[in-house]
Image: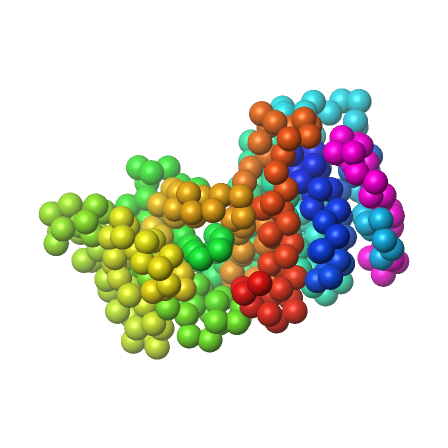
Amino acid sequence: MGDPAGIGPEVATKAVAHRDLAASCRPLLVGDAAVLRQALQLIGSHLTLDVIADVRAMRFQPGACPALDLRNVDLAALEPGRVSADSGRASHAYVKLATELAINGEVDAIATGPINKAAWHAAGIPHVGHTELIAALASPDAPASQVTTMLATHGLRVVHVTRHVPLGGVAALITRDRVLDTIRTTHKGLVQMGIPEPRVAVAALNPHGGDGGLLGREEIEEIAPAVHAARQAGIDADGPIPADSVFFRAIAGEFDVVVAMYHDQGHIPIKTHDFARSVTVTLGLPFLRTSVDHGTAFGMAWQGKADETSMVEAIRLAARLARGRGFAP
């Protein structure tokens, strides 16, 4: 359900109340039952919680949703819209338990609600966010480069070479090996998700693709060699393509995915194209994981105003992929 002080409980409860989701999956809420009940009351839902202690005890009845209750939130002390170490520890526990369920094959996929990185930091949690924690739990011996995040919305998918890095430090991280690893992980992930021959566009880092080295040499020395190596390995990769045109070309259907060089280069086109329905998919894991593509939105927490569309789309996509139906609705 995400951070209890944010909009996670609201969007989670609103999402599982969508009756059409029952046609494609059986949702299980992981969180604090007292918080979830308060969220149901906030949104005026008639949905009830069926609190269970074991996944094997799940029952699916109309008007009810099974929930694993970690009982780790003190409602009297909870401050909506505030960064809290207690809330950070609570949301960390939800992600950890959901991941363990997926690792053990007790659930087919997980769809995560929003956590707050500052709250995790305040709680002393060493992982930056969801993806880093899930990757460490699922594949502790695998290189971090084998796991990456793809943003997806209707008509556009984007994977990033770097994510939570200050802009001033990005260029130093754009290396041939890192770009090539991202292309490979992207290609493998899309194949596993039902696109047999993914067309991968690789964005340039610098304006105008570096203008032949006048505006930067990363395209010449790092990105182009990575694309060449990917093509030699049989991957349909193209680039580096200037970022001011590559996303338009992808939306037009020329590519299945764009490999972006840094966080905002990829996030801005996704969220401009279709903010409400954008979700994230983690590539390189031994199980399926999707997530909302927004944060805890502390400014509107516990006001009943949060839009659950991204959570609904994350659950729907997880269900489609788990059933082998690919990305198409």
Decide if residue 104 is in sight here: no
Answer yes or no: is residue 325 visible: yes
Q: From the viewer's perspective, is residue 3 above or below residue 19?
A: above
Identify the residue shown where x is 60% and y is 58%. Answer: 317
Q: Position of residue 162 (x, y in %)?
A: 39, 49
For the point 28% across and 65% down, which residue is it? 238
Q: Is residue 33 shown left or right of residue 209? A: right
Q: Examine the structure image and report whether residue 150 is included in the region drawn in magenta.
A: no
Residue at the image point whose x is 54% and y is 56% from the top: 281
Residue 38 at x, y percent in the picture: 79, 32
Q: Is residue 215 above or below residue 85?
A: below
44 falls in the magenta region = yes
- Position of 287 with respect to 53 (left or right) is left
- Residue 124's x, y, as percent? 61, 34
Labels in figure, total: 0
Q: Position of residue 255 (x, y in %)?
A: 36, 64
Q: Is residue 188 left or right of residue 101?
A: left
Nearer the observer, 325 or 207: 325
- The answer to which quarter of the image holds residue 251 is bottom left
Visual colour scheme: rainbow
Query: In the rendered image, which quarter contains the C terminus?
Result: bottom right
* In the image, residue 76 above or below residue 316: above
Give the residue at x 73% y 42%. Answer: 13
Question: Which span is picked out in magenta?
Answer: 37-59
Judge whether 296 appears above or below 280 on screen.
Answer: above
- Left or right of 76? Residue 131 is left
| Quarter the N terminus occupies | top right
